Image: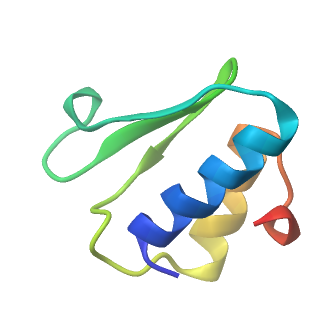
Amino acid sequence: MKGSEFLRRLGKVARTRGLSMSFDPGKGKGSHGRVFLGPNFTALKDPKKEIGAGLLSKMCRDLGIKPSDL
């Protein structure tokens, strides 16, 4: 899954759970940015690139959701 698809799916999860979701590209180095889901946040590498299974799992854990929720 690409970073842009992750953001789109995360937006759906946020709407169903009634949480706020935002992506701030200025809160990271280089092409990285920060994704906020309610009170939780994680780093997202370039939204144009693929996210591996291990990184996806870690990002979901940081945000307090399961990869299967996406």
Against 19, is 13 above or below?
A: below
Q: Residue furthest top?
A: 39
Q: Is residue 45 left or right of residue 1?
A: left
Q: Is residue 59 visible?
A: no
Q: Is residue 58 visible?
A: yes
Against 61, is 25 above or below?
A: above
Q: Is residue 47 left or right of residue 64?
A: left
The residue sitting at 72% across, 65% down in the picture is: 57
Against 18, is 60 above or below?
A: below
Query: Looking at the rendering, which quadrant does residue 15 occupy?
Result: top right
Instruction: Provide residue 66's location: percent of width, then percent of height.
Output: 86, 58
Q: Nearer the viewer, residue 29 or 36?
A: 36
Q: Residue furthest left?
A: 30
Query: Looking at the rendering, which quadrant does residue 6 occupy?
Result: bottom right
Classify the position of the C terminus by image quarter: bottom right
State the scheme by which the image is colored.
Answer: rainbow
Q: Is residue 46 left or right of residue 6?
A: left
The residue sitting at 83% across, 49% down in the picture is: 65
Instruction: Provide residue 11's location: percent of width, then percent of height.
Output: 61, 48
Query: Looking at the rendering, which quadrant does residue 46 occupy?
Result: bottom left
Instruction: Provide residue 41's location: percent of width, then percent of height.
Output: 58, 31
The residue sitting at 80% across, 28% down in the picture is: 18
Q: State the count of labels.
A: 0
Instruction: Provide residue 50's location: percent of width, then percent of height.
Output: 40, 81
The residue sitting at 81% across, 40% down in the picture is: 64
